[in-house]
Image: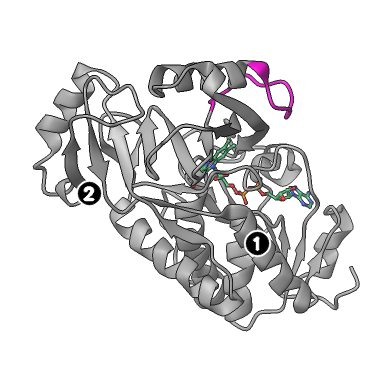
Amino acid sequence: MTHTHPHFLIVGQGLAGSWLAYRLIQSGQHVVILDVDLPGASSKVAAGLIDPFSGRRFVKALHSDVLLPFAKTAYTEVENHLNCRVYYPKPSVRLHAHADERKAWERKRCWPELSPYFGHDMGDFPGFHAPFGGVEVKEAGYVHVSVFLKAMADFFMALGCLIQRPFCEKDVLHAERVIFCEGHRGKENLFFKHLPFSNVKGDILTVDHKAQLPDTLVHKGKWILPLSPTRFKTGASYIRDYVDFEPSLAGRTDICTFLSDTLDLPASGYHVAAHEAGVRPILSDNRPVLGFLSEHPNIGIFNGLGSRGVLQAPYYAEKLTRHCIDRSSLELDIHISRFRCA
Ligand SMILES: Cc1cc2nc3c(=O)[nH]c(=O)nc-3n(C[C@H](O)[C@H](O)[C@H](O)COP(=O)(O)OP(=O)(O)OC[C@H]3O[C@@H](n4cnc5c(N)ncnc54)[C@H](O)[C@@H]3O)c2cc1C
C-alpha cells in the first residue's frame, strides 16, 4: 500500500464499504479503500428499491420506521454534498396476488403501525392483471445505486483514498484497523469462516416495451420499476443453490413467468434488453453483521445487508462509525459476537 498507515483500511466499495468509508472520513479518520470488480457483486446490479414492507401479506420490514427516514436524509445529504441525484421517491402499488392476500390487507389496514404506509385501495389497475385489486403504498422509492457508487468512487478518488486492487494478507500490517465489506465474498474470508453465510443469487432484467404503463412501482411478489415510458427493470429471482455468478436461464424464466402473469400484455409486446445477476450477502439470521473480532481487535466486518442494502447501509454504517470513534456499543443482534468461533 502506498498510503502511510491509515486509521482504517476498508475492503470493498459496494453499499456497505461506501457508506462506512464516507462516514469515517467525515469523522476525520484517515481511510484507504480497496476495491476490485469481482463477479457477483450485489450493489452493481441492485434495483435499489426502498419499501416499508418485506415480502407478501404486508409484513413490515424490520425497523422500517427508523431506517426509512434515516436513509432518506442520508441519501439527500450525499446528493447535496456530491452534487448528484440518487434518491427517487416513486408512487408504489402492491397488487394482491390472491384472495388471501387481499384479506390480510383488509385485516391490517387499520393497524396503527401499518396504516400510515397505506394509501388508496386500487380496485382496478390498468395495464396489469389485478383480479384481487391492490393498494397504494406510501414512502416507497428507489436509489439509483450505480450513480451513487460512481459519485462515491469519484469522491474517494479525488481524496486519493480509493485503490482499485484486491486485498492481500500483508495489507493488515499497514493499517491500524481493517474492516471487510466484501459482500457475498465474505463467505470465503478466512477471518470469518465461522460466520453462517447463506447467500442468495438474484437475476434482474431490463425490459423494453411499447405499452402505456403507469409510472408506478408495482409489486406482486416480484416487482416492476419503470425507468422511462418505454423501459422498466424487473426482478428479482431468489436462487439459493447457485453454482456460478452468471445470469441464469432459470432466473430469467422465473421473472418472465411473473411478467406474463402480471402484465396485461402479450409476450411479443416486450423484450429483454439486459439480464444481470448478483449475490445477496445474507447471514443465517437475516441480520447485518458488524464489529471487530475479539481475538483480532483490529479486524472488523460490515456485511449481511441481504435484500435491503439500500435501506440498511446508511444506518448501520453510522452505528459502526460511532462504535469505532466513540466506542459506543453495538446491539447484540447485529454484533459479530453473536456468532461463536468454533
Ligand atoms: C438481483 C438483486 C436485486 C437487489 N435489489 C435490491 C433492492 O432493490 N433494494 C435493496 O436495498 N437491495 C437490493 N439488493 C441487495 C443489495 O444489492 C445488497 O444488500 C448490497 O448491495 C450489499 O452491498 P455490499 O457492499 O455488502 O456488497 P457488494 O455490493 O457485493 O460489494 C462488495 C464489493 O467488494 C468488492 N470486493 C470483495 N472482496 C474484495 C477483496 N478481497 N478485495 C477487493 N475488493 C473486494 C466487490 O467486488 C464489491 O465491489 C439486491 C441484490 C440483488 C442480487
Q: Residue at x 61, y 71 (%)?
A: 22
Q: Does 239 lie within the magenta span?
A: yes
Percent of width and height locating residue 124: 22, 29
Q: Secondary structure at mark 2?
A: helix
- Asked whether mark 2 lies closer than 8 Å to ligand 1, one says no
> Quadrant of residue 198 in the image?
top right
Q: CA distance from mark 2 to mark 1?
A: 42 Å
- Which residue lies at the image location 47% right of the left edge and 43% below the top edge? 226
Asked if the stretch drawn in magenta spans residue 66, the answer is no
Q: Residues within 10 Å of mark 2 (few under 14, many from 20)?
A: some
How far across and down, in percent of the image, does residue 234 sit?
Answer: 52, 33
Please tell me in which quadrant of the rendered image residue 248 appears: top right
> Looking at this view, is 246 or 174 the one in front?
246
Q: Is residue 136 above or below residue 95?
A: below
- Badge 2 is on which residue? 117
Taking the image as shown, residue 181 lies to the left or right of residue 230, namely right
Q: Does ligand 1 reach within 8 Å of label 1's beta carbon?
A: no
Which residue lies under the disc numbered 1? 297
- Disc 2 residue type (three-letter): Tyr
Q: Nearer the viewer, residue 43 or 27?
A: 43
Q: Left or right: 88 with respect to 238?
A: left
**Main SS of the magenta segment?**
loop
Q: Residue furthest right?
A: 2
Q: Which residues are magenta?
A: 237-249
Query: Foreground: 88 or 187?
Result: 88
Report the amino acid beneath label 1.
Pro
Image check: 117 left or right of 339? Answer: left
* Res. 289 in view: yes
Q: Position of residue 219 (x, y in %)?
A: 37, 34
Judged by depth in the image, the label closer to the viewer, 2 or 1, is 2
